[in-house]
């Protein structure tokens, strides 16, 4: 409870301070101006649910401090705010206990009650007096001591637009996350409140600053650096694709970036990596739906495969260094077990004289913008392997391809739009598609048989090869016995086949 209280205090402090500053600037810029001008001068984007208390707080400031009437204030609020939803995960849509709100922010809670009362009155008028419908659309959820404020609902009601962050996500927001709101606004004749605006990243940081070698080549070929502010100009770079001199320059720049990462890893982790191997990178928050565990499982399979070979056969295999990085939320036990397994597997295979020249696994701790600018330009291929329909967009996928790397991934998030831009032949897609998920989930719940290669990987973990297997049992149990919610076992064979395609293609460096 104390942790929740601190979090709410932090959110309210920053939101209220920002709104008060906005209002002060608005008033001092042109004293005596009409409040109706505020939406013409101010737009506030609610970046997920975290700042959505701003809807109620702006009402408080307009009514209590600046003495506007409710109707005028509400009309202004609804023209100022827009809401970006960033996830389809229900647990990420914030809910605050009413008891906590009442004790910490009693006036804000009063305003939320009144917003909800008027909102439900509108719902009754539009949808009829149906208790189930009212319950599904109410900003308040539950009863008595367990009542909570659904902050995403407050954000939707108080905003003029709601957007998803990739084409597929925008559709899921309408069909799976907030269908009841889409139905309500449709009955009101409003069909454009829910839209899609695909995420983006700045090429100033994620190309020009972090990858000066590649940027210099592009600028030389295009004749100037206007592309940094307009990436559509990169189409002019296509005509150099078959130029052997430019190919060499690009690959030389890549090698220098890989050497830079190798130096970083040696300095911080005291692990030697060979920059002439394929650099396969997965860096992002550790989460079950992002499936870092799937990556570790295929690395163990690759290790078993290498161990089964003769030294002569091993020499024909594509050499690979895999980097995984990311942080786990403090209380996210399974995510922490993934990090533990990753480190345990790395410590074994990196020290195995039979395989260490052909496969290494490095977990990079403390992943952040600072080291991302070293990690991302070094990628040959990057992993974006979330279960289809779970990744709202992803932005690291954009950063990696902007830095002259290819993607192995699922048909999910912005991977889909990247595929449309680069062509299916230039991306390695695997696994169940969004339309397959319901059937695949049922299949795995009904204990469909696993690929034998995955069974062997589990046996190796349980054998103690990577340390005390009890440490990893919760991780194994999380997908066994019909629990494969994120379809790791379902997609495993398809993932291995995609990895084989990557190996084959990388062997031909000119084509790569």
Image: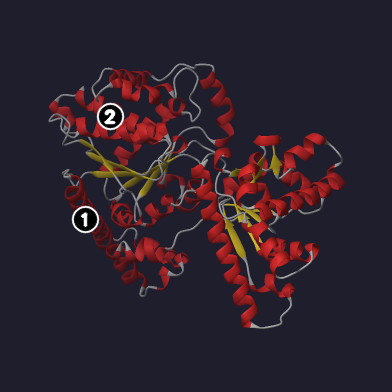
Give 467 or 319, whichever is nearer the viewer: 467
Q: Residue drawn 49% across and 35% down?
A: 387
Q: Residue drawn 40% across and 27% down?
A: 493
Q: Is residue 462 left or right of residue 446?
A: left
Residue 441 in percent (x, y) is at 55, 26
Q: Residue 228 has which mark?
A: none
Residue 172 in percent (x, y) is at 62, 42
Badge 2 marks a residue whose secondary structure is helix
Figure colour scheme:
secondary structure
The answer to whether residue 481 shows anywhere in this view is yes
Query: Which is nearer the N-term, disc 2 or disc 1?
Result: 1
Q: Is residue 437 left or right of residue 69?
A: left
Q: Which residue is mark 2?
A: 302
Give 313 or 38, whichever is nearer the viewer: 38
Badge 1 marks a residue whose secondary structure is helix
Is residue 229 positioned above or below 437 on the image? below
Q: How many marks?
A: 2
The answer to whether residue 151 shows anywhere in this view is no
Q: Quadrant of residue 74?
A: bottom right
Q: Is residue 410 left or right of residue 109?
A: left
Is residue 300 positioned above or below 55 on the image? above
- Counting other residues with Cα less than 10 Å from the Cα at mark 1, is it few (<14), some (14-19), or many (20 or more)? some
Q: Is residue 505 left or right of residue 58?
A: left
- Counting other residues with Cα less than 10 Å from the Cα at mark 2, is it few (<14), some (14-19), or many (20 or more)? some
Per the model, the C-alpha gap separating discs 2 and 1 is 26 Å
Label 2 with label 1: CB-CB less than 8 Å: no
Give 206 or 41, whichever is nearer the viewer: 41
Of labels 2 and 1, the one closer to you: 1
Q: Residue drawn 31% across and 17% down?
A: 459
Q: Which residue is mark 1?
A: 260
Residue 359 in percent (x, y) is at 22, 35
Residue 88 in percent (x, y) is at 57, 41
């Amino acid at each position: 409870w104390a942790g929740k209280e601190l979090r709410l205090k932090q959110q309210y402090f920053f939101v209220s301070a920002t709104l008060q500053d906005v209002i002060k600037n608005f008033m001092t810029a042109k004293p005596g101006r009409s409040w109706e001008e505020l939406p013409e001068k101010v737009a506030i984007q609610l970046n997920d649910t975290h700042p959505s208390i701003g809807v109620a707080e702006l009402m408080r400031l307009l009514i209590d401090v600046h003495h506007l009437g409710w109707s005028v204030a509400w009309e202004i609020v609804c023209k100022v705010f827009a809401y970006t939803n960033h996830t389809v995960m229900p647990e990420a849509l914030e809910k605050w206990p009413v008891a906590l709100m009442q004790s910490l922010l009693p006036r804000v809670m009063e305003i939320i009650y009144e917003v909800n009362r008027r909102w439900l009155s509108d719902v009754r008028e539009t949808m009829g007096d149906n208790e189930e419908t009212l319950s599904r659309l109410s900003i308040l959820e539950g009863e008595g001591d367990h009542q909570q404020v659904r902050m995403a609902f407050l954000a939707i009601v108080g905003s003029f637009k709601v957007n998803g962050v990739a084409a597929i996500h925008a559709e899921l927001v309408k069909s799976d996350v907030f269908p009841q709101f889409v139905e309500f606004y449709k009955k009101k004749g409003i069909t454009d409140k829910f839209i899609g605006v695909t995420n983006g990243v700045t090429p100033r940081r994620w190309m020009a600053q972090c990858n000066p070698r590649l940027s210099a080549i592009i600028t030389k070929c295009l004749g100037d650096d206007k592309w940094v502010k307009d990436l559509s100009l990169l189409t002019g770079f296509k005509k150099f694709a078959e130029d052997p001199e430019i190919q060499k320059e690009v690959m030389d720049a890549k090698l220098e970036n890989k050497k830079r990462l190798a130096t970083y890893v040696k300095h911080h982790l005291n692990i030697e990596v060979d920059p002439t191997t394929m650099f396969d990178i997965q860096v992002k928050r550790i989460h079950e739906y992002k499936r870092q565990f799937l990556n570790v499982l295929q690395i163990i399979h690759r290790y078993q495969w290498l161990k089964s070979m003769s030294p002569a056969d091993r020499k024909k295999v594509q050499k690979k260094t895999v980097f995984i990085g990311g942080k786990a939320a403090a209380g996210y036990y399974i995510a922490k077990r993934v990090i533990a397994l990753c480190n345990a597997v790395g410590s074994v295979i990196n020290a195995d004289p039979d395989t260490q020249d052909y496969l290494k696994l490095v977990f990079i701790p403390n992943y952040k913008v600072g080291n991302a600018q070293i990690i991302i330009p070094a990628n040959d291929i990057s992993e974006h392997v979330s279960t289809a329909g779970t990744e709202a967009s992803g932005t690291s996928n954009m950063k990696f391809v902007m830095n002259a790397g290819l993607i192995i991934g699922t048909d999910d998030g912005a991977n889909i739009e990247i595929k449309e831009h680069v062509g299916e032949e230039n991306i390695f897609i695997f696994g169940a598609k969004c339309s397959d998920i319901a059937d695949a989930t049922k299949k795995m719940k009904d204990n469909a048989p696993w690929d034998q290669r995955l069974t062997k990987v589990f046996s190796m973990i349980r054998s103690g090869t990577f340390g005390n297997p009890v440490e990893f049992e919760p991780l194994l149990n999380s997908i066994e016995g019909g629990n494969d919610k994120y379809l790791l076992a379902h997609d495993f064979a398809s993932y291995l086949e995609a990895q084989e395609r990557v190996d084959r293609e990388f062997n031909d460096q000119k084509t790569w």
